[in-house]
Image (cartoon, rainbow, N blue to C red):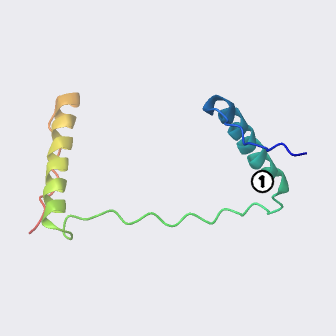
Amino acid sequence: MSEKLSPQVISRRKALPILGLVGVFGFASAMLASDADAQEAAPAPAPPAPATTTGGTAGMKRRQGRRSTRHERRHARRTGEPAAPAPAPTQ
């Protein structure tokens, strides 16, 4: 019993499967040992009110103006008749 024990060097190729098995067993044990009940879903919050062009920042107003003209052009292109223009944003 006088011989010395030396740690063996483990290669990456040998370590990867071992780590994978440890992860699988850890995940499985966590799933099996969990005795917590599932929580009921909370009711969905009401959707936010649509943004109006009368309020908001100047950037929001510009963006809304571009969006409305884009919709008008698209409608005219698809139907062949001009769309009713949206009311212009007030400043």
Where residue 2 appears, as percent x and y from the top left, is 87, 46
Left or right of 52 on screen, residue 17? right
Q: Name the residue under label 1.
A: 30
Left or right of 31 on screen, residue 69? left
Q: Residue furthest front?
A: 2
Work out whether residue 42 or residue 6 is closer to the camera in this orientation and state it.
6
Question: Quadrant of the rendered structure where residue 48 is?
Answer: bottom left
Left or right of 45 on screen, residue 6? right
Rendered-image quadrant of the C terminus = bottom left
Where residue 68 appears, as percent x and y from the top left, is 18, 49
Rendered-image quadrant of the N terminus = top right
Question: Quadrant of the rendered structure where residue 10 is?
Answer: top right
Where residue 71 appears, as percent x and y from the top left, is 21, 42
Work out whether residue 37 or residue 45 is closer to the camera in this orientation and state it.
37
Where residue 47 appears, as percent x and y from the top left, is 45, 63
Residue at 15% from the left image edge and 61% from the top image edge: 59
Identify which amino acid the numbered label 1 is placed on: Ala
SS for tag 1?
A: helix
Work out whether residue 15 or residue 1 is closer to the camera in this orientation and state it.
1
Left or right of 80 on screen, residue 39? right
Q: Relative to 46, does residue 73 appear above or below in the rendering?
A: above
Q: Relative to 74, does residue 65 appear above or below in the rendering?
A: below
Q: Residue furthest right?
A: 1
Q: Relative to 58, does residue 5 appear above or below in the rendering?
A: above
Question: Quadrant of the rendered structure where residue 8 is?
Answer: top right
Work out whether residue 62 or residue 2 is closer to the camera in this orientation and state it.
2
Query: What crowding class fits label 1: few (fewer than 14 Cα within 10 Å), some (14-19), or many (20 or more)?
Result: few
Residue at 56% from the left image edge and 63% from the top image edge: 44
Total numbered labels: 1
